[in-house]
Image: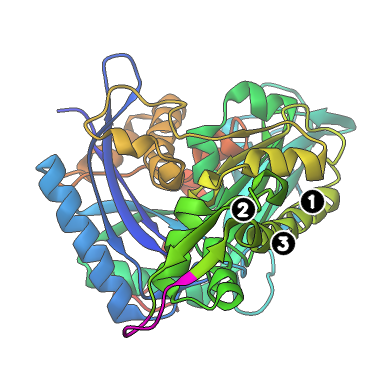
Amino acid sequence: MSDIIVGLDIGTTKVCAVAGRLDDYGQLEIIGMGSAVSEGVRDGVVSNINRTTTAIQQALIAAEKDAQIEIGIVNVGIAGKHIRSVQQKGGITLRHKDEEITMDDVIRLSNDMYRMITDPGHQIIHVIPQQYTVDHEESIKDPVGMAGVRLDGQFNVITASSNAIRNIKRCVDRAELEIDDLILEPLASSISVLSEEEKEAGVMIVDIGGGTTDVAIFYEGVLRHTAVIPFGGDIITSDIKQGCAVMPQQAELLKVKFGRSLSEEANENEVVSIPGIRNRPPKEISIKNLAYIIEARMDEVIELAMAELRRSGFEHRLTAGVVLTGGGALLKNIKQLFEYRTGLDARIGYPNEHLGKSKRDEIKNPMYATAVGLVLAGFKALEKTSASYDDEHMDGATNKQDNKHRVSDTSSNAGGNFFSSMLRKAKDLLIDDYDDSGYYQ
């Protein structure tokens, strides 16, 4: 039986578990999925352990029934406004002179970055290489095989709140699951919706979720910058609730069924009637006014996303423009709004970049981009690990399966050719920080 990998997306509006395997053509086949309403997550961060645990269990049961498997190990996504991305430099002196640089040297340099001092209450979750310098030779993507004495590197170091990580782990532990890897959600989404050509040309992915909007910027195939904007679809629903004086459920339905991101595309004479409360007369909502409310909030999201693009220094290098994904990408006219406001080409990102024939067609919806990416991340990392590690490492990984369905290393090639192999060793620094009770040491 081929490996089965499970991704667990703990979002603000839903918790989703997706199980997949590779078909004979190397494409991802989704064999099962389950989702549940998320009531214990706020702005992408766990705020209620019991409710989140219950949602995880419900999604897990549905996925197991759908795929007819027992799930024990999962890839889990992490997001939230606590996520930080900083550029750091590091270097090592090679222990072997007059010999070529090896993969072990590159891994040692990456591992050193995991030991850097972070802000209080934060810890490193990803170290993504940007470029290397061998002695005085700069801008090297692949230093392995080169001769040199000094190896330096520039890295994109991504940190997350230790408390946020701890709370995710508690929820997953209570659901009787094991976390194989914790992966930044925009990295996962990028794997499922971006092509390698887009990453090489320069692209910004904007993943509009329920509680947050995740931004990731790629250039020359490497993740250059990532950020989390604390606004998502939920705040648009809240704006509609207040602006139109309706109930939350009615506001959500108005957004999904009648909402537009561009007010100029809405008809001024079009109205929708909302049932009144307790025999009160129905309320008529102008579709034009509804569009004004949505457009105002989306303008704010776009402005914050462009601020992150300027901060990254790649504002004028995005040949491939913007890719929009997540549930918020389903808003009408959102592609046009992004193009008008940013001056960049835009497209809606569906998570079918690496999908083959799947059991569930609804998985191709942009709202499942992160969940699909978490599964793909495992397979891509497994492929990298197979190519980079000896039989001893592979034996250890194989023994891990044991009828439980494995998930492999962190976000794979999203950060460059060495990302997966570096993280295989460096990941242990994160996992070892937890004691047997699940508390952070």
**Gap between marks 3 and 1 measured at Cα:** 16 Å
Secondary structure beneath label 2? loop
Image position, residue 89 (x, y; %):
79, 51
Task: Please rate how many residues cluster around mark 2, counting C-alpha atoms within 10 Å: few if below 14, some from 14 to 19, many from 20.
Answer: few
Q: CA distance from mark 1 to mark 2?
A: 34 Å
Q: Which mark is residue 269?
A: 2
As rendered, which of 61 and 231 lies closer to the eye? 231
Residue under the image location 36 percent in, 40 percent down: 375
Give the mark toward the camera: 2 or 3.
2
- Mark positioned earlier in the residue sequence (2 or 3): 2
Tell me the magenta residue range.
277-283
Q: Of residues 5 and 303, which is closer to you in this image?
A: 303
Q: Quadrant of residue 133?
A: top right
Task: Kindly identify the amino acid type of the residue bearing the numbered disc 1.
Answer: Met
Image quarter of the C terminus: bottom left
Residue 282, magenta (yes or no): yes
Q: Which residue is mark 1?
A: 306
Amino acid type at circle 3 is Ala
Q: Residue furthest right?
A: 136
